[in-house]
Amino acid sequence: MTEMSLNSSNTSVLQISVVGGGIAGLTAALALRRNGHHVQVFEASEAKTEVGAALVVPQNALLVLDHLRISRENLKGVPFLGGVSIDPESGESTITRWPAARGNNAIGLCCHRSDLYEELKRVATGEGEGPAVKLRLGTKVLACDPEAGTISLNNGEAVQADLILGTDGGNSIIRTHIVGEVQRTTYSGVTCFRTVFELPASEVPELRWLTDEVSGSRTFISKEEPFRMLLMYPCRAGTLLNFVGFYDDPLQDVEGWSQKASRQDIISKFQGFHPKFLPVLDLQSHSEILKWRLGVLPQLPTWIRGRAALLGDAAHAPLPFLAQGAAMAIEDAGAIGCLFPAGTSLEDVPERLKAYQDLRKERGEFVSNGSVEQLKHLKSGGPIGRFHSVSLAQLYGYDTIKTAQQCYEERFGNKSSAN
């Protein structure tokens, strides 16, 4: 067994195993590294990348990234100031400008996933505060003993640590060992096309509607059943265009959770929509077109057991209709960083994990449930610029770092200070 030098009550540095090297895992690893802990991240992929799509990094997630000193400039984000809803029949536009959040003109940044991922990896594994995170690619975790703090790897190695974080997504191995049974995501009845196109350097009159009026999203939503929705927004400093086409798919025409698709597949599904979107499909491809089935994770009885906890999609996998999936993972990671400051001992771990669950589970489930309600809202003809069961303040105005630091002070006193 490989021991990450098991901790003792006299030691102020934890040995931490993070299972899953995506956005959730790297953000958590970075937050804990800054507190002086030793962190290893175990990622099954041989060459982990975040490709094929963009995401909105909303204000609530940016607060955490700012706290972790992630450079907004390096994220190459396009300001998310509002959106334009386009009538799928007439092609006429309705402009929505989001109310400013926390005095900031933008309530988020439209970023390519790989830009966010690469910046997190750079800061987590490079020079900086605390020991550099060790990212172990091509290392699949087969099992976990949350009580003993051990994980078993595909190379036969067993690794023991003071804290195990399951950030291994919707098909989480760690979740099965924490909950005690397999909990799978269930199909939502909606599938989407997802791809990224390259935007031309010079202006194309037929595509001016993508950038005119307000920086942010462009949407077309069907007025009648079946539900169909096109969503587009620029990213990577305006050089790329994220493209998503959602549609009702009760027959589940995707084998597994994803498969390749074509431009003609998109055109076929969105027949009858105003043709102004068609020139987008003539743009140079930046990534292949995929069809993704959208799944929902049932509420879990617990996120913690022994020395282990779940973060991100392993704990709560919302639908993308509130643009909060990655944000919730980043919030979880920020909270973990505040609850495990320098000076945390092995004996502290169970109570700190209980505080984490008390702090995060209700919010994660609230957003996940809200994403399901938002889909129902959109299907019933509700406008894209309004949320059905949540408010802007509840989503974008939430300050994870402030809330988690207050929780720490109330429960554990000023034993040490979170970075």
Image (spheres, rainbow, N blue to C red):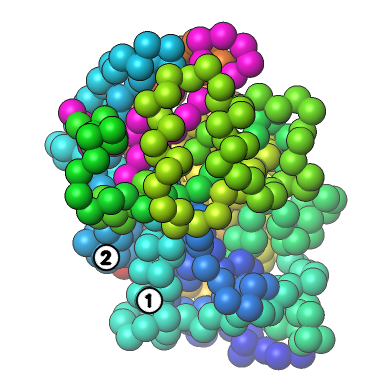
Position of residue 372 in the picture relative to residue 147 (left or right): left
Which residue is at 56% across, 22% downward? 271
Residue 342 vs 88, above or below: the answer is below
Asked whether, in this view, residue 185 is left or right of residue 54, the answer is right
Q: Which residue is drawn at 78% across and 86% down?
A: 155
Query: Is 165 on the left or on the right of 188, as rendered?
Result: left
Residue 230 colored magenta?
yes
Q: What element carries label 1?
A: helix
The answer for how far apart the CA atoms under marks 2 and 1 are is 11 Å
- Residue underneath mark 2: 74
Disc number placed over residue 406 in the picture, else none: none
Residue 204 seen anywhere in this rendered image of the structure? yes
Vertical position of residue 205 compared to residue 35: above or below: above
Boundaries of the magenta span: 213-235
In which quadrant of the rendered image does the C terminus lie? bottom left
Judging by the rendered image, the residue that carries numbered circle 1 is 122
**Residue type, label 2:** Asn
Give the dominant element type of the magenta stretch: helix, strand or loop.
strand
